[in-house]
Image (cartoon, rainbow, N blue to C red):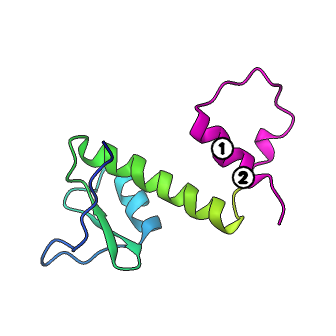
Amino acid sequence: MGSVMRIDPIPDTKPVSLEEGISLLEAGQGEGLVVDLGNGRTASADGHRGTDGLLQRLRGHRMMLSLATGGADLSRFEGLNDSVIVAPLVQEILDATGQKD
C-alpha cells in the first residue's frame, strides 16, 4: 500500500517549499511541517514513519521531478557493469532516463 499524502494543508500551517521542507527535516525541525508539492498538493509527516518517512518521500519526489525535467545527473550510472541488481521498476526508470527523444 502506498503512503498517504494530505491533499489539504493542516489549518493554520503555511506550507513550505520542497527544498525548504527537506532542509528543515534534515535539521531535525520538521515537527508539524506541511510541504507544498505543487498543483495544490501537500505532504506532511502523518504516516507511520513520521518525519523520517516524510523526508524520504520528499527526497524521492525531488528526484522524480529532476528526472522528469532532465535535470538529474546520471553520470554516476554510466560505465557500471551488468552485475548491479536493482528492482525492476527502478531499472525501468533508469532505462527511460537514458532515452533521447
For the point 24% across and 64% down, the residue is 6
SS type, badge 1: helix
Query: Can residue 27 be seen at all in this image of the molecule?
Result: no
Contact? badges 2 and 1 (CB < 8 Å): yes
Q: Is residue 82 above or below residue 41?
A: above
Q: What segment carries the magenta color?
A: 74-101
Residue 13 appears left or right of 59? left
Q: Where residue 30 sits in the image (x, y, percent)? A: 27, 56
As drawn, the label of residue 96 is: 2
Seen from the viewer's position, the closer of residues 41 and 75 is 41
* In the rendered image, the vertical position of residue 12 relative to residue 80, given as above or below: below
| Residue occupying image coordinates x 48% and y 52% | 59
- Classify residue 92 as left or right of residue 64: right
Secondary structure under tag 2 reads helix
Amino acid beneath label 1: Glu
Q: Which mark is residue 92?
A: 1
Residue type at mark 2: give it.
Ala
